[in-house]
Image: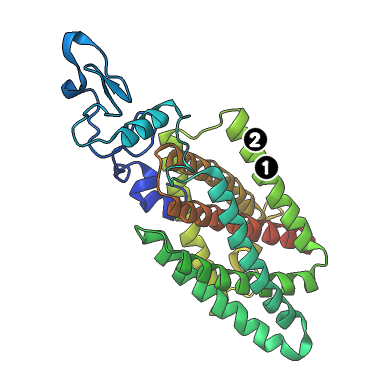
Amino acid sequence: MSNPYFSHSPVFNGSAATASAPQRTPNGYPTMPGYQPGQADTQATQAYGQAPAYGYQTGGQYGQAPAYGDVSPQQVSDLEAQYGAPSATNVDRGRMTYDDVIVRTFGIFAVILAAGAVSWMLAVNEATMGLGMLALIVGAIGALALGLVNSFKREPSPALILTYAVFEGTMLGAFSGVMEMIYPGIVMQAVLASATTFGVVLLAYKFAGFRLSSRAQRILLTAMGGYLVFSVVNLVLSLTGVVSDPWGLRGVTIMGLPLGLIIGLVAVVMAAFSLTMDFEFVQRGVEQGLPTRYAWAGAFGLVVTLVWLYVEFVRILAILRDN
């Protein structure tokens, strides 16, 4: 699908059954010992069809509780209270909620911002600019490696996801710092553009019911694969000096328009569509009642797409300023 983590995770793409849960009452609470749904307790029936009375039995015997097999009167009382209580929510059952995903998403971004602030200062300071460039390269390699590791793990690892956030923040901080020095104000513009796109897509998904069909998802996946190949080729050509333009093949003009601008706009559209699919995967995880730990997976998937969106906006704005 759109995001590698969601598309390879059976718990999000629906290819695996939801994790088994302990036996529960119809309201979602754990069953008590001896509980057998749908079966009457024949031992509780007294002679002449009379219902059992708590604290009293026929024959003048007081203080004796009716026999319910291995279940004590206190357990029966607890079971009746559970049946009368409101249905258990995902929080009560230790299952993933939207709030869990939101909190973890903000947590990952907090780590990215903290690491980014350090590498930003290194990149913009003339005395430490070399360290800033090293931080950019190390951060990019580390983020790519851990991004792939997290994408193909069947079980989310909070430690690996947060470590990815450190590398991602290191790369983004240095990259953003350099771009801000060359194009003042570009970072804030890219952040606002990314936040606006996220909000529009979320509103369209929530209130307008915007979804991608299966055919559209396959087309998007193919387009993303082609974009990845182009990005790798462009990077190799730039590093080897085959293309002298700072933007590589993106600097080539077609009918007066830079190729990078055209490709960048297409990439933004793909990232926006990917957000729609990310929302759908998170919703599916909540509705299936996945364990709370999978909220880390949902947060990681959203962060990956948002970072991609931000980088594309920075590149588009930079190309526009150059022309």
Q: Amino acid at mark 2?
A: Leu
Q: Name above or below for residue 133 compared with residue 313.
A: below
Q: Name above or below for residue 287 compared with residue 122.
A: above
Observer-nearest of 247 and 191? 191
Observer-nearest of 3 and 90? 90
> Which residue sits at x=62%, y=67%?
112
Q: Residues within 10 Å of mark 1 (few under 14, many from 20)?
A: few
> Which residue sits at x=21%, y=29%?
67
Q: Is residue 120 left or right of residue 32?
A: right
Residue 246 in view (yes/no): no
In the picture, residue 128 is in which quadrant?
Answer: bottom right
- Residue 313: percent from left, percent from top: 68, 56
- Residue 35: percent from left, percent from top: 25, 33
- Residue 220: percent from left, percent from top: 47, 44
Observer-nearest of 160 and 33? 33
Q: Which residue is mark 2?
A: 203
In the picture, residue 78 is in which quadrant?
Answer: top left
Q: Secondary structure at mark 2?
A: helix
Q: Which residue is mark 1?
A: 199
Disc 1 and disc 2: Cα gap in Å? Answer: 6 Å
- Residue 137: percent from left, percent from top: 57, 79
Q: Is residue 295 left or right of residue 256?
A: left
Q: Which mark is residue 133?
A: none
> Which residue sits at x=16%, y=13%?
47
The image quadrant where one finds the C terminus is bottom right
Q: Name above or below for residue 202 compared with residue 315.
A: above
User: What colour-coding does the image apply?
Assistant: rainbow
CB atoms of marks 1 and 2 within 8 Å: yes
Q: Amino acid at mark 1?
A: Gly
